[in-house]
Image: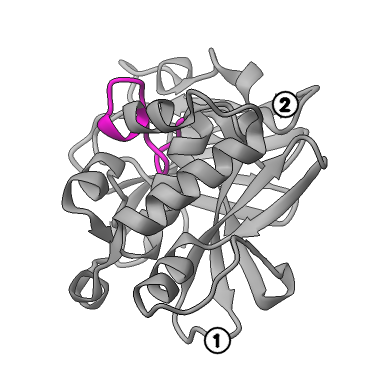
Amino acid sequence: MISTTSLATTTSVSEVINKNKLDNGVISVNYNKDSKIKVMISKDNKKYSYNLNNQSIQIPLQLGNGKYNVFILENIQGNKYKVLSKQNINLQLQDQNKVYLQPIQLINWNNDMNAIKKAKEITQYCKDDEEKVMAIYNYVINNISYDYDKAKTVKTGYVPCIDEVIKDSKGICYDYSSLFAGMLRSVGVPTKLVMGYKNDIKTYHAWNQVYLQKSNKWVTIDTTYDSCLKNKNLSLSMIKDSNQYKVSKEY
């Protein structure tokens, strides 16, 4: 059962939900409380949830223009939550790809990060987005190895840190896709982090969709898959057949 309460009188809704970057398709949420707090974004029949953990997080409004409902939820027990706050947000972007250039909780990046410095370094002489994508793709599949031990022990709620992936030179599919997205976004290439299933992988998977401006289309790229193929000296191609993938979530 979900019950409804109001936020404490010392915290207004406007202080919790910051819309200063709404023109970029994102909002910031900050609510400090010593309990398990989630943010839930809903539009039409789709819902996305994020753990708050006493820190400000940036959240994408990636479901297109229109009305969004933003809920701040507090855990009561088990999987039961109560609504602390609700706000409606109307998004009207002229360029809906803009949201896929922003840092968000699952693709957290800034210009001081080593991963982002590396992205700018290896793309500085690239002539267009396609060359940037290829340069970063080659860097990732050649320098990051799949972490089989981490895949066995990773806990629910895990969020990648792309600089740790660079430092450790290894990661799981979530790490690969977050790193690839962060590096590409930082050099101006709209990129989605996508979760779901691949036809020949039994477990839940993560990969990317990248917008190529010259051809005006989104393409599917799977750096995890190709890194593993490369390590086995098998042939690979950067752009995948999207029909081999089933999308559950995209960010």
Check disc 2 and report the residue beneath it: 90
In the rendered image of this protein, does residue 69 appear above or below residue 47?
A: above
Near mark 1 (Cα within 10 A), the count class, few <14, some 14-19 or many ≥20, is few
Check disc 1 and report the residue beneath it: 200
Residue drawn 58% across the image and 26% down it: 188
Q: Secondary structure at mark 1?
A: loop
Closer-to-camera residue (197/238): 238
Near mark 2 (Cα within 10 A), the count class, few <14, some 14-19 or many ≥20, is few
In this picture the colour scheme is: one colour
Q: Is residue 65 left or right of residue 221?
A: right
User: What is the count of numbered marks?
Assistant: 2
Q: Which residues are magenta?
A: 103-116
Position in image of residue 10 (x %, y %): 30, 15
Position in image of residue 217 (x %, y %): 79, 46
Closer-to-camera residue (198/51): 198
Label 2 vs label 1, nearer the camera: 1
Position in image of residue 246 (x %, y %): 65, 73
Q: Amino acid at mark 1?
A: Asp
